[in-house]
Amino acid sequence: TSSMMSSASGSGPTQSLRDIVQESLSNVLQASTAQLPNDKWIVLVVDPQSLRVISSSIGMYNLMEHHVSIVEDLMKKRAPFRDQA
């Protein structure tokens, strides 16, 4: 058996849900960080459900490629991040 599924039209393999989410997140991050200088990084603050989706679909290495330095849970109490410019 093949690990790739065929599409309903029989035109070829389809992406897994994880691949689709990973591609979508990469596209959103690319668009969001495209205007940042190379020495600037962002903090991604998300709700618990989004954190689970991000954690299961895209690795920290991929996030760092898009200048995300840390991913924080919106509900977690934390100290404010200061501008390090």
Image (cartoon, rainbow, N blue to C red):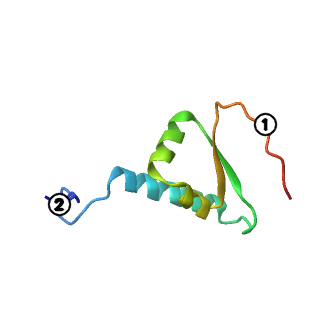
Asked which secondary structure carries label 2, the reply is loop
Residue 28, horizontal then vertical, whole percent: 55, 56
Q: Is residue 7 above or below residue 55?
A: below
Farthest right residue?
Answer: 85
Residue 41, horizontal then vertical, whole percent: 71, 58
Mark nearer the N terminus (2 vs 1): 2
Residue 62, horizontal then vertical, whole percent: 54, 60
Distance Cα–Cα, label 2 vs label 1? 49 Å
Q: Amino acid at mark 2?
A: Ser
Locate the C terminus by quadrant.
bottom right
Residue of label 2 = 2
Neighbour class for label 2 at 10 Å: few (<14), some, many (≥20)?
few
Which residue is painted at 38% across and 56% down in the image? Answer: 19
Locate the N terminus by quadrant.
bottom left
Q: Nearer the viewer, residue 43 or 13?
A: 43
Farthest left residue?
Answer: 1
Residue of label 1 = 79
Q: Is residue 36 above or below residue 49?
A: below
Which residue is painted at 75% across and 62% down in the image? Answer: 40
